Every structure is written in structure tokens, then in C-alpha cells.
Amino acid sequence: MSDAYARIPEEARDRLAALAAAVGMSLRAYAVQFAETLLTPDERAARAEQTRAALKECNGCAHTHAQEGDLDSEPDRRLARAGPR
């Protein structure tokens, strides 16, 4: 595997190095782990589609996009209704 270089602000590099050190990793290993654990937008969309297909197959659940949006906003509605404590 060849190494690549990316120019980032010094502050960002130092913060990432500190985060890596806090978990006992090198900055290089931390960056590799970070890249391996995140999904691209296309990967997220594919995983969402697989999940929708599995839900439909298992229990017949097949929400429309409008219903999904309504479900996504439900926690915000409940928090707003609860108000500050």
C-alpha cells in the first residue's frame, strides 16, 4: 500500500493526532480506521435500500418517502412539546 499526503490545517492535524494518541493509535492508523468505518453517501443509500427491502420482506413494512420524513421528524416534535426542563 502506498502512502498519500493530504494538506490539512495544522490545527486539524494536531487535534487528530491528539485523538489518535488518546486511544493508543498513530495518526496514520487512526485515519485508516476512520476511513474504514464511515460510509459514502452512495453506500448509505444502498444500505438504506437494503434495509427497506428487508423490512418489507420480514413484516410488510413499506413506508413511502413522505411517511419516512414524518417519522424522522417525530422525535423533534416530541422534544418541542416537552419543552425545557
Image (cartoon, rainbow, N blue to C red):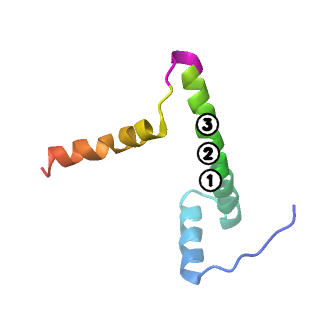
The x, y position of residue 72, in whole percent, is 39, 42
Disc 2 packing (10 Å; few <14; some 14–19; many ≥20): few
Give the residue at x 51% y 17%: 59
Quickly name the residue at label 2. Answer: 45
Q: What are the residue bounds of the magenta stretch?
A: 57-61
Asked whether the residues under the numbered discs 2 and 3 touch, taking CB atoms below 8 Å apart as contact, a structural biologist would say yes
The x, y position of residue 76, in whole percent, is 29, 47
The local secondary structure at tag 1 comes to: helix
Asked whether the residues under the numbered discs 1 and 2 touch, taking CB atoms below 8 Å apart as contact, a structural biologist would say yes
Q: CA distance from mark 3 to mark 1?
A: 12 Å
Q: CA distance from mark 1 to mark 2?
A: 6 Å
As drawn, the label of residue 49 is 3
Give the residue at x 56% y 76%: 12
Residue type for callout 3: Glu
Residue type for callout 1: Pro
Magenta stretch, main secondary structure class: helix
Quickly name the residue at label 1. Answer: 41
The x, y position of residue 1, in whole percent, is 87, 60
